[in-house]
Image (spheres, helix red, strand yellow):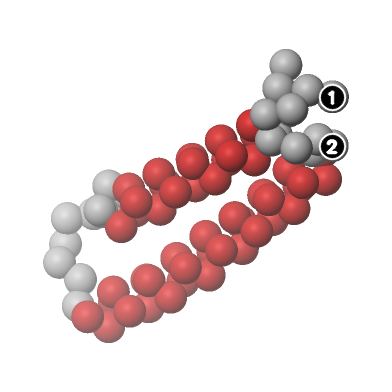
Amino acid sequence: MLKGYRTVLFNIVMAIVAMLQALGAFGDTKIPTSEDIGHAVDALDAVLVFFWGLGNIILRYYTTTQIGKKE
């Protein structure tokens, strides 16, 4: 099986989750204030970047070949 696809797949999934979050797919229906939005965006950015980076580090640890190459 080809190796390196997990990293690409993980990044695609994270991008989809970030887009859904931006579109409000996970939120409630109350209209937030601009202050609420600012705090939420700052917190969400920090959390997403943390997990994105952590995920890439973990995947890089297990990846031994280039993307699309067999071992």
Q: Quadrant of residue 4?
A: top right
Residue 23: image location, x then y, percent: 25, 53
| Residue at 37% across, 71% down | 40
Q: Position of residue 30 (x, y in %)?
A: 16, 62
State the image quarter where residue 44 is shown. bottom left
Q: Amino acid at mark 1?
A: Glu
Task: Between residue 67 and residue 6, name the one nearer to us.
Answer: 67
The answer to whether residue 36 is left or right of residue 10 is: left
Residue depicted at 40% across the width and 53% down the height: 18
Q: Position of residue 47 (x, y in %)?
A: 54, 64
Kind of residue at badge 2: Thr
Q: Are marks 1 and 2 in contact (CB under 8 Å)?
A: yes
Q: Which residue is mark 2?
A: 64
Q: Which residue is mark 1?
A: 71
- Mark 2 Cα shell of 10 Å, populated few (<14), some (14-19), many (≥20): few
Distance of mark 1 from mark 2, alpha carbons? Answer: 8 Å
Secondary element type, mark 1: loop
Q: Residue furthest top?
A: 1
Q: Secondary structure at mark 2?
A: loop
Residue at horizontal 43%, vertical 75%? 42
For the N terminus, the image quarter is: top right
